[in-house]
Amino acid sequence: MRRISTVFFRYACFYTAGVLFWIFFLFVFWYVLDVTGRVLPANHMEAELNEAAGGIRKVSKVTEELLPEGCLYGVYGSDGSWLYGTLSGKEISEAWENYERGSIYGRKRGYYRFIALDSQEICIVKYEIAPRFKNEVLEKYLPNPDVLLVLSFIVLFLIHTVLVSRYFGKYMKKKLLVLSEVTARIRDHDLEFEEEHSELKEVEEVLISLNQMKEALKESLYRQWNLEKSREEQITALAHDIKTPLTVIRGNAELLAEGGLTEEEQEYDRDILRSVSMMEEYLALLNELLSEDMKQEESGRYNEKSCDGLADLFTEQARLLASAKQRTVIFHRKELYGTLWCDEHQILRAFHNILGNAVEYSPPNGRIDISMEMRVKEEGDYLAVSVADEGPGFTIQDLEHAAEQFYQGDQSRSSKNHHGIGLYTAERFVKAQGGCLVIENTVTHNARVSMMLRIHKTGTTPDDQ
């Protein structure tokens, strides 16, 4: 098992060896060029100029053919007047100034050679001390050999650096990929997988920690699940056991009601029966809360349902409940279109809870208005189903907390039969479909609750939308 530092050192050695190889390669390449004469030495101009100096002094007119290739020259009178030559611009004056100062150094790599002609004229030759290509084409289009050598090393160095860096990066990415896979599985609660290992010591230490965390999380989840299961079973059994004495109490109270009781005793008996009914409702509520999570898991049966078809179900459900509770229901249904991607059972339960609240708070012979219409918003189209009653409206506190679990508000919109889960459950079901619940008061200060159900787009689910 290796450490990351060891791997890095290995790549550093490989990188250094590569750089040294390119230096050696360029050195050998330069040596071959020098031995074969393809590159002229740096002082070749100066050497040729020394050989040609004697002949230049004797000629009556200096020409380029007398000078080494690449040299520039200028011929001056004894008083410094310019006569002729290949120097141009500032070089003409600079060359004479150097002659007067006795300085042979020009700009950059330039040097000056002063030749006194037999004709009393002064020939000033400008040359360079630098290696050159013997081939004229190479000399014309490429930099000087020494400059080209440095540029070649820089390019090779950069290419070598990039290649080694990428290779090292790919190697480390491959070795670290196992960490991403393990953390992704733990994040997704996929805890049933074999332990992973790595040849890198630091990665292996992290994997050991992740495996320990996985086992601890799995044990914790199992323990929590067992506790929840045991709690539900105990409460369910207890709720079932409570039904037996309640049944006895109800039966005896009903038998007493059939006997000759005084008015006061009958009132007591009725109180007993009402209390038994309330306890039975609480037990039913408790069973509903206990099974809610299980129903939630089992109810994930999403499918397409037309808005018109769902509106028909709402209408039928409202008529049945209103008839049983002797309430008047007025329907306001506009033209509907589109389909919903939803769990029909959940949406109907949400509507039933909203409608049940409206029936409960509506006064005797009160009116309930149910409207169904399409609403267009920036994020999409919605089927809006609103239920308004003629009872007391929501208070400011109700508007903030009405959809919270077990919230019962003040006495204006609460009763002994209200347990604070109707709107909570409705909102949860509507949100699961991709919509929202709107709780508000009408202009006449009555309560109104609206389900905003998101219209389905083909190929999507509520989570996608």
Image: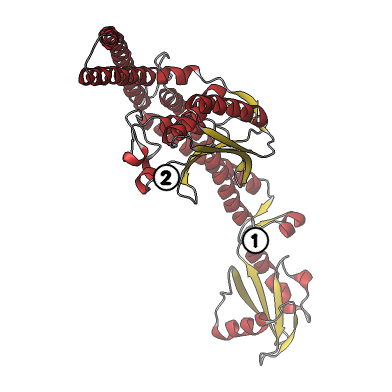
Q: CA distance from mark 2 to mark 1?
A: 107 Å
Q: Residue at x 44, y 34 (%)?
A: 364
In front of the other: 293 or 310: 310
Look at mark 2 in the image and give the residue it sits on: 393
Question: Relative to residue 190, is residue 368 drawn left or right?
Answer: right
- Numbered marks: total: 2
Q: Amino acid at mark 2?
A: Gly
Question: Relative to residue 180, is residue 370 drawn left or right?
Answer: right
Disc number for residue 162 = none
Disc 1, SS:
helix
Q: Position of residue 284 (x, y in %)?
A: 36, 17
Q: Position of residue 20 (x, y in %)?
A: 50, 40
Taking 90 as reference, is 371 above or below it? above
* Closer mark to the observer between disc 2 and disc 1: 2
The quarter in which the N terminus is drawn is top left
In front of the other: 87 or 49: 87
Taking 245 as reference, is 74 above or below it? below
Q: Amino acid at mark 1?
A: His
Q: Counting residues from the N terminus, which is met first, the one under dot 2 or under dot 1?
A: 1
Look at mark 1 in the image and give the residue it sits on: 44
Q: In which quarter of the view is residue 394 placed?
A: top left
Q: Position of residue 54 (x, y in %)?
A: 69, 73
Colour treatment of the image: secondary structure
Q: Residue at x 69, y 38 (%)?
A: 335
Disc 2, SS:
loop
Taking 96 as reference, is 179 above or below it? above
Q: Residues within 10 Å of mark 2 (few under 14, many from 20)?
A: many
The quarter in which the C terminus is drawn is top right
Taking 394 as reference, is 210 above or below it? above
Q: Position of residue 23 (x, y in %)?
A: 53, 43
